[in-house]
Image (tube, grey):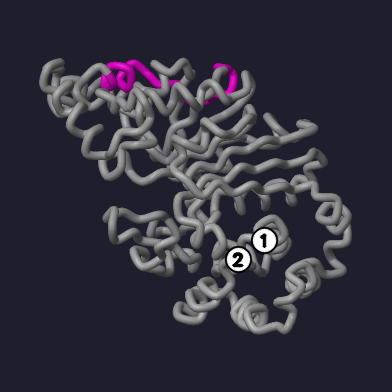
Amino acid sequence: MGNINTFNFLFTDDRSVGLYDVSVGDIYHSKFGALTEAWEKFILPINFEKNFINKKELKVLDICYGIGYNTKALLKKLFQTDFNGQVKIDAIEYNNNLVLLSPFIIDGFQNSIPEISYVLCKNLINNIYQNKDTLTNLILNNYKFFAPFYKSLIKKYKYWGYSYNIEKQNNLFLHNIYYHCISKRFKSYQNAFKNKKYVLNPYFMDARKAIKLIDSCYDLIFLDAFTPTKLPTLWTLDFFKELYLISKDDSILVTYSNSAAVRHAMIDAGYYVGKIFDKMNRPSGTIASKNIKFIKNQLNDFDLGLIETNAGIYFRDINLCSTPEEIFYEYNLRKKSLNLESSSHYIKSNKNKRETVQ
């Protein structure tokens, strides 16, 4: 945990910063835009104004928080809609440095809604202080990926002469960020910030362990783990069963994955499942809920048939502690024993049906 050396920072097409994990061999964000992806795949599908705007308290679980795009995009939606309820976000991420860098990275929000950075800093300040030396070095060594204001501020934060008084140093740090992010144009937000309307709790651990520790039921769950074929641990039937238990009856779970196996696991866990489409009307993710009224685009006959082929064989992790290698091994044994129709044969045989339903 906390090893940043396996990550490469990069600019995506919308000029927001993304990440590539060398050890896993997978990207954290679409090359077309980290900010755009969060907005289109995680925020637009939940139809916030219709489904959640009247909530007195909004509870959110952000699985694989990374550098925070899904949480930031949600905060943007909350600010835009003048949401009046209390907000609690539980953010799970194995790598603590990524979470602590999230307020400072160039993400496309600094100019339009700079309050987001303040909300994150205020909730992460103690962890930021404990890791300020590491964060300073990471920011200065990758300076072009971080907003200029924060580069200079966090460098000062490391050397300010208040080490004997942590609270004073933290307050001064937040004071500078507050008046940078919250201008006179945003007075309506000030009381909300001061009254702790927005609470973010980070969990720096394996999500399978974290959900066992969390005593909460959620309105929204963002699942943004690495691709199932790269890292299957958070895509198993057993993990979805746990998520089902901590989902409210009127909750929504969203993910970028279109996998038939993932959708099959969601269904067998108890969820109603549907498809997400992008602005070009292309499949771009999956939505799940205990309440079918939240599923705008339900799986059609072609999709349901596909999950009965070998493409729909899901991963298992009964005790929620298996290694990826163990999960893949069990999966391949089961796949061989089931001997289901291949997905390629099914797609070819149902080509006309597929073209009709899409």
- Seen at 67% across and 61% down, the residue is 126
- Seen at 63% across and 77% down, the residue is 154
- Where is residue 7 drawn, in percent x and y? 37, 64
The answer to whether the residue labelled 2 contacts the one labelled 1, judged by CB atoms less than 8 Å apart, is: yes
**Three-letter code for the amino acid on which mark 2 is drawn:** Gln
Instruction: Name the secondary structure under disc 2.
Output: helix
Magenta segment range?
A: 291-307
Residue, disc 2: 130
Quarter of the view holding residue 330 = top left
Asked if the magenta segment contains residue 294, the reply would be yes
- Where is residue 335 drawn, in percent x and y? 16, 23
Q: Is residue 89 left or right of residue 143?
A: right
CA distance separating discs 2 and 1 = 6 Å
- Where is residue 298 drawn, in percent x and y? 46, 21
Instruction: Name the secondary structure under disc 1.
Output: helix
Q: Is residue 250 above or below residue 79?
A: above
User: Camera-side residue: 312 or 49?
Assistant: 312
Quarter of the view holding residue 100 = bottom right
**Three-letter code for the amino acid on which mark 1 is drawn:** Asn
Q: Quadrant of the N terminus?
A: bottom left
Q: Can you name the residue that lies furthest to the front here?
A: 164
Quarter of the view holding residue 181 = bottom right
User: Camera-side residue: 293 or 327?
Assistant: 327
User: Camera-side residue: 72 or 95?
Assistant: 95
Residue 139 numbered mark, or none: none
Residue 264 in sight here: yes
Asked if the magenta segment contains residue 297, the reply would be yes
Residue, disc 1: 126
